[in-house]
Amino acid sequence: MSAAIPLSMPDDLLKVVRETAKQTGLSQQDVMRQSIRAGLPKVREQFAGSTGRITNVDPLPKKVLERLYAERDDDEESIRRFIAAQPKDSE
């Protein structure tokens, strides 16, 4: 199944499509279809809504997290010193 979709294109882009069609031996329609196929993943990556992640670093595996957090690691003395160092006269 296919659908015809009218497409308004700026002259400079149309020129590139025509040149590419001539260089590759493809029709202008095929050049546009292949360009869309090749470019959609990049467009989706760049413009799709946020995944909610604030980093591109993958999360640690569950087993690694369990090992890291298996023991309590409070630094109560540092916390007490930090609280004691706070100004006492602030509003």
Image (tube, rainbow, N blue to C red):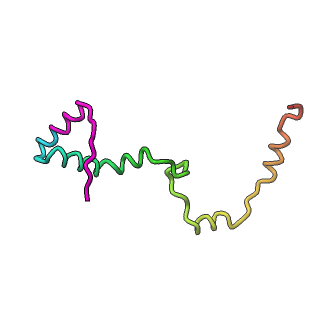
**In percent of the image, x 27 and y 40: which residue is there?**
7
How far across and how far down the image is residue 89, in percent?
89, 31
Q: Nearer the viewer, residue 5 or 39?
A: 5
Q: Position of 73 compared to 53: left or right?
A: right
Tell whether 47 sits left or right of 81. left
Asked where in the image residue 90 lies, by quadrant, the reply is top right
| Picture quarter with the C terminus | top right
Let me know if residue 64 is in the magenta part. Answer: no
Instruction: Answer above or below: position of 58 versus 64.
Output: above
Q: Which residues are magenta?
A: 1-18
Q: How many marks?
A: 0
User: 81 or 19: which is nearer to us?
Assistant: 19
Q: Residue at x 14, y 46 (%)?
A: 27
Left or right: 22 with respect to 44? left
Q: Position of residue 48 (x, y in %)?
A: 45, 47
Q: How far across and down, in percent of the image, does residue 60 sit?
A: 55, 61
Q: Return the residue found at the far bottom.
A: 63
The extreme right residue here reads: 89
In the picture, the quarter occupied by the N terminus is: bottom left
Instruction: Identify the residue at image location x=55%, y=65%.
Output: 61
Above/below status of 80 relative to 65:
above
Residue at (19% x, 49% y) in the render: 30
Q: At which x and y percent is residue 70?
A: 68, 67
